[in-house]
Image (spheres, rainbow, N blue to C red):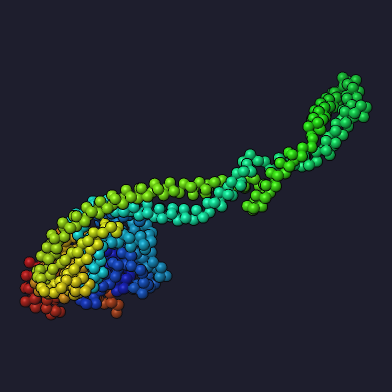
């Protein structure tokens, strides 16, 4: 429920703050006093798009703030779904800055307009005489039946099943499309993968292959060169090793005389050891090098395959070819595994579909059972509202088409007079009849479902006398379970309110301002007397007002 509404710098409102209570609160005021402005500010708070022209002083910020007590509303999941912080005492705020920019907050956290609009229907329901879109909606009509039938548990179960079924169906649709596209590429991807796999990329070192190829191509020249090097090392008298050994002998004669000479000898000795190792390796290499036309052909063939594949795939290394091979392998395996995934999901889809159908059948049966009782209750409530011959006809049909609330389709037909054919509400119900039907529907819903704050904006237009009195009785009964605010011009309804707010205009320094006032008992008597007799309050009007209030 709304506990406090604060409005600053909006239309004719300069700065007002009103505390609201549970039960039935009546809002009255002369035409043009600003009741519609109050509704406009409330609509802004609930997510209506901001308009800078509605700001009273464009040089200042406009702020509309509502305090809501929602600890019994069970809205934790709604807050979570919309990424909002839940608080039992929640504050909604809208701001219009002088720049024209609009901001919205929930519990002081900035939110988008979409988040605010998603939350609003669970907090306040504003209904006027001309607001008939909701009542002619099949979903709303089904909501009435379900509330009356106590279908909340079955609905939650069905909606979970339906959500899962939709999710699986979407996944299957996606997989079928993937399989269709993948099938076209499977042969080509398989060919590319096999082509890369045959080369044995994962055990291939391109640099080693290129060196091997160069070595085999120049085997004779390499062998000649190595043998010549070996000869230069080992040849008697002039070989490098022989020369170094002679020098070592000479240094050996004087190394004992000085550390320096000993160091010369050690360095030369190390060099001789290294040269001997090098000489042996060169000789071994020379002996191992031989022309091998077959090996050369195989090596060159593999290199050419690598170059060809690198050019084909637009890469320059074996590592990149390996990445491409892995990617192709994944694509091929994914394509081949799609059938298994699709078969598994199709079985799952059948199971969840059968479960949802079973739950929707339970919903249908409970709805069918509830409709006669609901029909009777609505007709009995309409009778004292000037519609004694009003009759409803609920045409409920079950199908295999899944909807968000089951597999039923519903058409609500109505006639207000005996002997006249039934028709849809949109076609056969007048504005006044529609308002009374909506009042009755809201009253039924209030008995069986936790509703948000309801605001009736002159829903009583077109009625008077005893009918207005009966409408007021219904509102009063409704307000026992839901906070109800009613904007009215009828004294019969105003008198039934537990609280009474007057909307009026005042002028200060040639500036007109809309104000609100919570009326005392004596002030209510005077207000209702004015509603009965006009601006001039007579003793008879006062007496009549007191009688209505009592």
Q: Is residue 515 left or right of residue 189?
A: left
- 278 shown above or below 108: above
Q: Residue at 92% x, 26% y: name it.
A: 236
Q: How many marks?
A: 0
In percent of width and height, residue 186 lies at 52, 51
Q: Residue at 20% x, 66% y: name it.
A: 412
In percent of width and height, residue 429 lies at 18, 73
Q: Is residue 297 left or right of residue 515?
A: right
**Is residue 243 at all visible to an observer of this figure?**
no
**Is residue 39 at all visible to an observer of this figure?**
yes
Give the quarter of the image for residue 522.
bottom left
In the rendered image, which quarter contains the N terminus?
Answer: bottom left
In percent of width and height, residue 513 lies at 28, 74
In the image shown, does 408 or 249 lie closer to the viewer?
408
Q: Residue furthest right?
A: 237
Give the quarter of the image for residue 516.
bottom left
Q: Is residue 98 left or right of residue 545?
A: right
In the rendered image, which quarter contains the C terminus?
Answer: bottom left
- 277 shown above or below 1: above
Q: Residue at 30% x, 77% y: name it.
A: 511
- 436 shown above or below 293: below
In percent of width and height, residue 113 lies at 37, 63
Q: Residue at 67% x, 41% y: name it.
A: 205
In the image shown, does 167 or 121 lie closer to the viewer?
167
């Amino acid at each position: 429920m709304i506990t406090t509404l604060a409005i600053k710098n909006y239309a004719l409102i300069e700065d007002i703050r009103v505390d609201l209570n549970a039960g039935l609160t009546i809002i009255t005021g002369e035409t043009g006093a600003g009741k519609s402005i109050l509704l406009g500010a409330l609509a802004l708070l609930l997510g209506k798009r901001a308009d800078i022209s509605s700001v009273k002083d464009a040089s200042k910020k406009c702020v509309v703030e509502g305090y809501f007590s929602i600890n019994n509303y069970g809205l934790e999941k709604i807050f979570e779904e919309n990424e909002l912080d839940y608080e039992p005492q929640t504050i909604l705020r809208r701001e219009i800055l002088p720049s024209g920019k609009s901001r919205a907050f929930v519990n002081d956290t900035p939110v988008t307009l979409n988040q605010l609009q998603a939350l609003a229907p669970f907090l306040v329901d504003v209904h006027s005489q001309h607001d008939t879109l909701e009542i002619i909606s099949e979903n709303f009509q089904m909501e009435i039946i379900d509330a009356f039938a106590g279908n909340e548990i079955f609905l939650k179960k069905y909606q979970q099943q339906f959500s899962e079924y939709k999710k699986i169906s979407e996944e299957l649709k996606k997989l079928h499309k993937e399989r269709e596209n993948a099938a076209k590429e499977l042969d080509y991807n398989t060919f590319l993968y096999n082509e890369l796999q045959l080369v044995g990329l994962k055990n291939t070192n391109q640099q080693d292959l290129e060196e091997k190829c160069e070595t085999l191509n120049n085997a004779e020249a390499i062998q000649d060169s190595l043998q010549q090097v070996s000869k230069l090392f080992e040849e008697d008298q002039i070989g490098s090793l022989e020369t170094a050994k002679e020098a070592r002998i000479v240094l050996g004669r004087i190394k004992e005389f000085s550390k320096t000479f000993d160091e010369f000898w050690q360095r030369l000795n190390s060099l001789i050891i290294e040269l001997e190792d090098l000489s042996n390796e060169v000789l071994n290499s020379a002996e191992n090098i031989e022309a091998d036309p077959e090996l050369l052909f195989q090596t060159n063939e593999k290199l050419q395959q690598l170059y060809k594949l690198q050019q084909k795939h637009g890469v320059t290394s074996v590592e990149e070819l390996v990445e491409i091979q892995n990617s192709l392998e994944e694509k091929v395996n994914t394509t081949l595994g799609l059938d298994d995934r699709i078969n598994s999901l199709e079985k799952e889809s059948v199971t969840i579909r059968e479960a949802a159908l079973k739950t929707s059948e339970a919903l249908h049966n409970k709805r069918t059972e509830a409709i006669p009782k609901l029909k009777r209750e609505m007709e009995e409530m309409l009778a004292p509202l000037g519609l004694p011959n009003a009759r409803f006809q609920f045409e409920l049909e079950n199908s295999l088409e899944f909807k968000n609330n089951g597999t039923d389709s519903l058409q609500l037909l109505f006639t207000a007079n005996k002997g006249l054919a039934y028709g849809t509400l949109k076609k056969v119900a007048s504005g006044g009849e529609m308002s009374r039907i909506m009042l009755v529907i809201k009253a039924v819903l209030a008995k069986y479902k936790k509703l948000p704050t309801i605001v009736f904006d002159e829903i009583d237009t077109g009625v008077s006398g005893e009918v207005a009195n009966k409408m007021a009785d219904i509102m009063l009964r409704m307000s026992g379970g839901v906070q109800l605010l009613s904007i009215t011009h009828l004294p019969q309804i105003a008198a039934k309110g537990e609280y009474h707010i007057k909307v009026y205009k005042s002028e200060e320094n040639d500036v007109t301002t809309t104000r609100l006032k919570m009326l005392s008992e004596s002030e209510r008597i005077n207000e209702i007397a004015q509603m009965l007799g006009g601006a001039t309050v007579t003793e008879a009007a006062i007496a009549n007002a007191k009688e209505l209030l009592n």
